[in-house]
Amino acid sequence: METEHKLVESKNGVVHYWIDRNVNKDAKWIVFTHGLTANHSMFERQVEYFAIKYSVITWDVPLHGLSRPYHDFSYNQTAIELKTILEKEKIEKVILVGMSMGGYPSQEFASLCPDMVEGFIALDTTPFGLKYYSKSDLWWLKQVAPMAKCFPDSILRKSMAKSVSKTGYSYEKMMEMLLPLTKAQIIEQMDLAYGEFAKENKEVSFAFPVLLLLGDSDTTGKVKLYNEKWSKITGYPLHIIRNAAHFSNGDNPEQVNMEIEAFIQEL
């Protein structure tokens, strides 16, 4: 089946998405949502695996990839864009996979449209919920963009790619996704993504199954700590991805795909 490249438009901008529609009309739908400064191609190793058996959507989140320029970015508006895509494609139920920042529009969508969600896989991301974050945590989030400004362009890109990857594949893929962005655009994405999280974070509770996946070498911020807390408070299973940093689905796609597959089989 050919991948279809499609788009939706709103007053905020144009959002691009890609569909691999399975020939089996009863196949479950999986929506993969990428991380900060990345784009839909972050999941190429998931798409080639899952498109054989499932229907798959990847997309360039507003303000990212081809979905630029985009005005008045928020996670709420991003979730609304996803709902528009699903309604346009007449998709009633999805399994959400949100990587890092992609976990926020996923959780926002799940809180807006719980009946449309079959399950959620949180991939090296952190929870919605006021109880998890101290005032200093939120303050530090807001410092990421200003601190990034101090780095020369090429050092910023290399340090970002190096910090999230454990394999050459993940490093090169991250560098490739950063390539079309200017330094100013990278800073803008960081600024809005972290700033909006601090503003839009809220208490949520989900009635559908949730699985937390975390790279064993994920040293991004306090992601590891938040996941341990998230699992402890909610009882959601936390599975560790071996030999993987923050971009665990690039570092160890075999285990990540296996974990997602096992989760779907149990739904």
Image: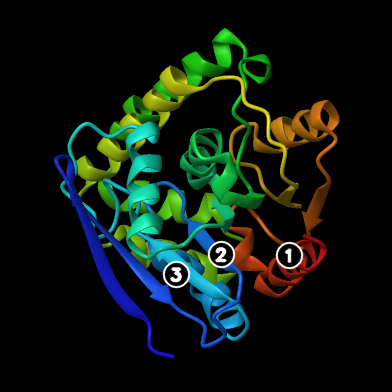
Q: Nearer the viewer, residue 64 or 250?
A: 64
Is residue 180 visible in this depiction of the protein? no
Q: Residue at x 57, y 54 (%)?
A: 96
Mark 1 touching mark 2, by CB under 8 A?
Answer: yes
**Amino acid type for the residue under numbered disc 2:** Ile
> Total marks drawn?
3
**Left or right of residue 215, residue 200 in this image:** left
Q: Secondary structure at mark 1?
A: helix
Q: Secondary structure at mark 2?
A: strand
**Left or right of residue 62, residue 97 in this image:** right
Q: Secondary structure at mark 3?
A: helix
Residue position marked by numbered label 1 in the rendering: 264
Residue farthest toward the top in the current orientation of the protein? 135
Q: Nearer the viewer, residue 256 or 202?
A: 202
Tell me which numbered mark, 1 or 3, is placed earlier along the sequence.
3
Q: Quadrant of residue 197?
A: top left
Q: Position of residue 22 (x, y in %)?
A: 52, 83
**Amino acid type for the residue under numbered disc 1:** Ile
Residue position marked by numbered label 3 in the rendering: 172
The disc placed on residue 30 is 2
Comparing labels 3 and 2, the label whose residue is closer to the camera:
2
